[in-house]
Image (tube, rainbow, N blue to C red):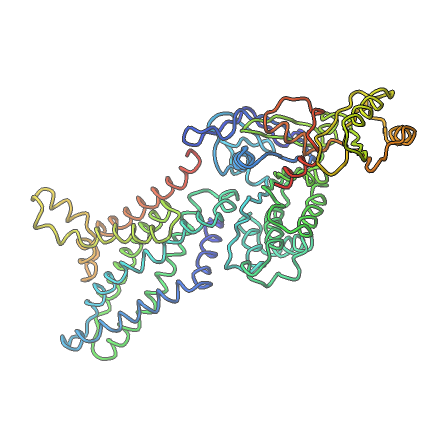
């Protein structure tokens, strides 16, 4: 058996003439937890629906666990556990009933059903709600039932569409840890637009934008790609003479690539963005310089470029260099929006 | 086959988890009770012939009500996504759902056995036509359920599914009453296509394989179309 669990080539899907995904190709190996990252409507769900044989591609082909999605769709579906974005479960069933049903339809019978149900209930922590109706469960528990359902037949591959969306932060962390656990023994593809989740849970990231894959890397690799960390210095003062002096002083220091004055926020502080030549921490040097020159230093921080910035650059199609950064405040605003 | 039964079992239980089955069964029996006895005593004959016409008519709202949610509701809530990404064939899904509805129809028929039983206690009931009448009813009801499954596969709205299948069933039930207005050649075709034409003989106690085959064909044809419609999601 080869180590490539999922292999897609040139997957294209058109809905009524609209291109949902455009020549998506990828390879996922055994044991990888692949984060599928992209803004809403980028084509994450469409790709997943194709890989799970819910829908067919307009063009292209894919193999899942060695089975072709068009000629052996039953084989594909046997190899996967799938949690759709909606996590739609039969509301009127009890958790136990539902899991037994999922097990039976997956071809388990008799004692095997009970055994597997017990295992997944333990694995996903559903013990307390096993006798409840699904409609009575919280979103977090429903998500667990969805995961339990996907795990019941011990599939080698799990495909999870936005498993952490709509959960409160605690639930999201629990589900994320659960997925991380599960991912130790299986190949997992999970889609999300939450970058923190990807950084923590995944060991590889695919970024998809407007139906195309725009990046394929490890979370660390993506961060490196974004460039070096930068320092932001805040100095008390308003007048432009001081601003100019500061800028020149900092620029004259060794190991500095570029200094830029950030827009005045009107709070009586001057802010500068300082980009180092290497990834070395400039803060001690900047601090000493400011003290020597008699600047009233009120802020000094070092920021790594995070995935968020990379993500936005890759998915909004801007090709400006990443160091041409925005004011940190405005970054935060956009992130919050 | 196992998977078909698993789906059927879940769907059948689902009827009783919600109010649908109770409402449908109760209303059906209530209306039957209201309309069965008065003509029975007027005619003063130990027969259940009238019961089958009445039940065939009552199936018109009943069958669509039983089938309307089978696929439409799964599409609306999205549960269909998990169902169809499990290793089941589309045919098994359609067949399983159909069997569940048919099972409920059978339960309903069992409940109505009270009528021939009480009639036979009042006088001598000829069980032959009674049983063949039940057979006819199961076939006609089965055909209506298959049409209902088909309508349910077309939409994600239960109400739309209900009315679509009710209209189609209505047409099949009553088109033989409009033959007068049709040119003779067309009239005979329409008459042959109607449910009544095949139902009446059997309800009278005459079992003709042609009639059985007619209803089985309607069932097969409708379910095949439903299968096609379910499959079409892949290419849309």
Query: Residue A158 location in percent, x, y?
Result: 62, 41
On-image quarter of the N terminus of chain A: top right
Task: Report which quarter residue A156 is drawn in.
Answer: top right
Asked if residue B54 is positioned above or below residue A32 in the image, the reply reads: below
Query: Residue A183 location in percent, x, y?
Result: 70, 41
Query: Residue A336 location in percent, x, y?
Result: 64, 41
Q: Residue at x 59, y 63 (%)?
A: A131
Task: Report which quarter residue A5 is drawn in.
Answer: top right
Query: Residue B226 location in percent, x, y?
Result: 36, 44
**A89 and B115: which is toward the camera:** A89
Left or right: B233 in relation to A80:
left
Q: How many marks?
A: 0
On-image quarter of the C terminus of chain A: top right
Left or right: B134 in relation to A84:
left
Q: Residue at x 14, y 77 (%)?
A: B42
**A295 and B80: which is toward the camera:** A295
**A199 and A312: which is toward the camera:** A312
**B188 and B135: which is toward the camera:** B188
Left or right: A145 in relation to B30:
right
Asked if residue A131 is positioned above or below residue A216 in the image, the reply reads: below
Q: Residue at x 86, y 28 (%)?
A: A282
């Amino acid at each position: 058996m080869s180590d490539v669990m999922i292999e897609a080539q040139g997957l294209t899907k058109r809905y009524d003439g609209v291109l949902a995904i455009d020549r998506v190709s990828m390879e996922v190996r055994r044991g990888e937890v692949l984060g599928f990252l992209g803004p809403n409507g980028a084509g994450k769900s469409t790709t997943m629906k194709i890989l799970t044989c819910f829908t067919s591609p307009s063009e292209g082909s894919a193999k899942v666990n060695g089975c072709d999605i068009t000629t052996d769709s039953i084989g594909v579906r046997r190899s996967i556990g799938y949690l759709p974005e909606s996590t739609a479960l039969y509301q009127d069933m009890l958790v136990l009933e539902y899991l037994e049903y999922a097990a039976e339809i997956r071809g388990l019978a008799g004692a095997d059903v009970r055994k597997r149900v017990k295992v997944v209930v333990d694995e996903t922590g559903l013990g307390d709600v096993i006798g409840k109706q699904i409609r009575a469960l919280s979103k977090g528990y429903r998500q667990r039932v969805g995961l339990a359902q996907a795990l019941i037949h011990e599939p080698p591959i799990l495909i999870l569409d936005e498993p952490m969306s709509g959960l409160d932060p605690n639930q999201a962390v629990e589900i994320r840890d659960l997925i991380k656990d599960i991912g130790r023994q299986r190949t997992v593809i999970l889609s999300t637009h939450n970058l923190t989740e990807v950084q923590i849970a995944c060991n590889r990231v695919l970024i998809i934008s407007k139906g195309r894959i725009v990046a394929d890397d490890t979370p660390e690799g993506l961060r490196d790609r974004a460039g070096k960390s930068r320092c932001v210095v805040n100095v008390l003062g308003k007048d432009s003479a001081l601003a100019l002096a500061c800028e020149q002083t900092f620029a004259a220091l060794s190991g500095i690539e570029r200094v830029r004055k950030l827009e005045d926020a009107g709070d009586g502080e001057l802010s500068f963005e300082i980009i180092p030549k290497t990834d070395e921490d400039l803060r001690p040097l900047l601090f000493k310089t400011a003290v020597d020159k008699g600047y009233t230093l009120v802020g000094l921080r070092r920021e790594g470029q995070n995935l968020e910035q990379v993500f936005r650059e890759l998915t909004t199609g801007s090709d400006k260099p990443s160091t041409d950064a925005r004011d940190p405040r405005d970054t935060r605003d956009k992130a919050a929006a | 086959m196992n998977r078909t039964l698993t789906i059927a079992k879940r769907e059948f239980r689902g009827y009783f988890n919600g109010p649908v089955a109770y409402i449908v069964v109760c209303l059906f029996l209530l209306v039957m009770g209201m309309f069965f006895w008065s003509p029975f005593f007027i005619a003063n004959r130990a027969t259940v012939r009238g019961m089958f016409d009445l039940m065939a008519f009552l199936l018109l709202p009943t069958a669509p009500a039983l089938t309307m949610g089978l696929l439409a509701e799964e599409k609306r809530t999205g549960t269909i996504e998990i169902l169809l990404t499990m290793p089941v064939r589309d045919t098994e899904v359609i067949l399983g759902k159909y069997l569940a509805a048919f099972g409920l129809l059978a339960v309903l028929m069992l409940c109505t056995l009270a009528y021939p039983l009480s009639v036979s206690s009042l006088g001598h009931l000829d069980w032959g036509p009674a049983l063949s009448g039940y057979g006819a009813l199961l076939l006609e009801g089965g055909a209506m359920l298959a049409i209902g499954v088909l309508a349910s596969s077309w939409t994600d709205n239960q109400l739309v599914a209900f009315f679509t299948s009710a209209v189609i069933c209505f047409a099949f039930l009553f088109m033989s009453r409009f033959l007068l207005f049709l040119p003779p050649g067309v009239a005979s075709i329409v008459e042959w296509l109607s449910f009544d034409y095949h139902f009446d003989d059997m309800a009278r106690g005459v079992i003709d394989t042609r009639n059985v085959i007619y209803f089985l064909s309607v069932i097969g044809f409708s379910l095949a179309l439903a299968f096609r419609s379910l499959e079409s999601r892949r290419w849309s």
